Amino acid sequence: MRGMRFDRPASCLVWLLAVTAAAGFVEPATGTAADEAENRPAAPAVSIAVRLPITGNRDTQVKAAILRQLERLKSRGGERGVLVLQFDSSDEEGPVASDFGRSLELARFLSDGRLAGIKTVAFLPEGARGHAVLVALACEEIVMPPDAVLGPANTDEPTVDDAMRAAYMQVAARRKTVPPAVALALLDPAAKVVRASTDDGEQFVEQKDLAALRDRLAVLDVEELGPLPLALTGRRGRELGIVRLLARTPAEVARSLGVDEQSLAVDPSLEGGWQGVQVVLAGPITADAVARTRSRIDEALAGGANFICLRIDSPGGAPAQSIVLATWLAALDPARVRTVAWVPREARADAALVALACDELVMTPTALLGGEGAATVDERQADALAVAWREGVAKKRGRSWSLPVALVKPGMTVRRAVQAATGRVEYFGDEELLPREDRDTWQMGADVGIGPIQLTGRLAESLGLAMHVVDGPDGLAKVYGLTGEMAVLEPGWADRLLDALASPGVAWLLLLIGGAGLYIELHTPGFGLGGFVSMVAFIVYFWSQYLHGTSGWLEVMLFLAGLFCLVAEIFVLPGFGVLGLGGGLLVIASLVLASQSFVLPANDYQIRQLQWSLLGILAAAIGVAVIGVLVRRWLPRAPVLRNVLLEPPAADDELDAEHLEELLGLEGTTTSRLAPAGKARVGGRVHDVATRGELIEPGVAIRVVEVRSGRVLVRPLDDGSPADGRAAR
């Protein structure tokens, strides 16, 4: 080794024994937190965020949060409670550095007697610099990723005074996590610190104290640390014995410490209580729904909320949009906000991905997660979905990705896997397991299912996807300690009206009103109240379904084309039948397509939705028939609305169809307005008649010019046209 020196002949053997003993204690530089996992009883644990830089009253907030958790962290059955301080450097991008006085106060508190019996762990996912280093030195253990950097501590402090030197060395000496000389080397660019291998193990001392060390111990090797001030990567810190564990995620930290993974989820409420807001995501997932959801969550965060309850009641509908929202949710800072997906009824298909992208998932026992939904996923889309989830969500959450993807991806098989050494349980598909370097350490068990897998709340809880299963909102509030009414960022009045109009019951009612109005209009001279009501009802129906994400221009065009064919059949080409039948089918197709997000059903869920759509249209048609019978009997006799609908002919005024041919050429008088259909008295009886487009007022003399397929066509006598038949009787 460089600079090796042997002061006694036997020191070689002593040195080898010392190195061997150290090798059994200090972990190799290539180790990870997962390698440290042991089957220990779960100890009480709490994770608290330390936001950097430490300025203002942030030290006071952290101390208050710790004091509120002391009882929870008390030793139980010999197991020490674990307090993990997760350093959050997302605010440390500017020139402001941690304040020395605030950092020192927090460091002294962490080494105070009040925390005796509690293991304090500094987790530095992005390292630490400036005087935040002092707070890390005050913890019992330091955990960080291999490439994260600890130090230097004199950031934006060009002048290091004696008070700072004394403070760093005092905190280090009290906690003994980092040797005082190394603490000084992290701070002072003028310090000279060496690492000496002795027959009593490694020693870190200032160079000026090296001679005194040699007087006490046999110094075998000397290495000068530098450059100063030190900036140690996690890997280098582990080599020096300063960093206890290498870990990238809270889950790895939890496994290495032998505590429950969920207990190390940073709880923003520890700083000052939950500020909860509920955001509703209901109905099919569309680009507009995703944009509105993100906007409402941003609004809540801007208002100071730190608990977002995303209530999901959706059949899915757009996998690409669900991935966009899921990736955005996974990127939210867990140190600032806790996101909880609340599924009281269903989060089918791709809506399940949105739910699982939140920090935690809460369901009712019978709620449904994943499975078939409003969207179908082909093989190409499924592969893209898996890649997007793996790279965009699973990596950020530090979770296995197979089971969430299998909730949406058809044909994907997921099996239960147990790691023999640790007892850890995961759920893998072959696509995830085979590329893993530790695949041989996993024992594969029974299949969970073949995608798209659908889970109830109870089953999702047993598989570790759902954190809690509760019976309702009160249970949700109880498990998270929410007090008072949680603000609900629901849609505005216009959006609430839209949701109500798009609901199946109201949608079918609109169809009933539109059909009834259309029936009345066909039996009314001119354009009247029935036509107006029908027009408004159908406009509202298609508008609400369009904004709800299930209707578009295709449905509107099919509906208008169907109406055009029906009108042509009635008034232009009566009796042929093709236009009438085709128009009716077009109208029905447009109404069905407007009520669902697919054209042709491709799974059981979509088949059930199609059945409901057809049932709704059938119910509306039956309702229109009943209303038609009632209005034909009642409306013409109503005091105010008697002129809305033509009064049906009396029984003695009715004429069989085979006798209509006798009316050809006869003259008569209109008894109602012809626009173009109406009533006229011809041959001593009242008949349903129509013109070829002319508008004729009541009391005008007319002549029957054509009788075809049961329809009587007339023409006014004063139009100058010759008579087409016999004279009037």
Image (cartoon, rainbow, N blue to C red):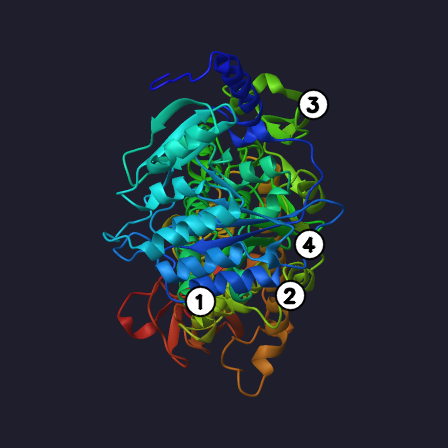
Cα distance, mark 4 to mark 2?
73 Å
Tell me the residue that label 1 is attached to: 304
Tell me the residue that label 4 is attached to: 74
Q: Nearer the viewer, mark 1 or mark 2?
A: 1
Give above or below for 656 relative to 631. above
Q: Residue at x 31, y 56 (%)?
A: 97
Tell me the residue that label 2 is attached to: 626
Residue 541 relative to residue 421: left or right: left
Q: Is residue 300 visible?
A: yes
In depth, the one of 405 and 702 nearer the eye is: 405
Q: Earlier in the sequence, mark 4 or mark 1?
A: 4
Q: Which mark is residue 279?
A: none
Graded by Cα atoms within 10 Å as few (under 14), some (14 to 19) or many (20 or more), the crowding at tag 2 reads few
| Kind of residue at disc 1 | Gly
Tell me the residue that label 3 is attached to: 445
Quadrant of the image for the N terminus? top left
| Kind of residue at disc 3 | Gly
Cα distance, mark 4 to mark 1?
32 Å
Q: Nearer the viewer, mark 2 or mark 3?
A: 3
| Kind of residue at disc 2 | Val
Q: Nearer the viewer, mark 1 or mark 3?
A: 1
Residue 488: x and y, percent?
52, 67
Q: Earlier in the sequence, mark 1 or mark 2?
A: 1
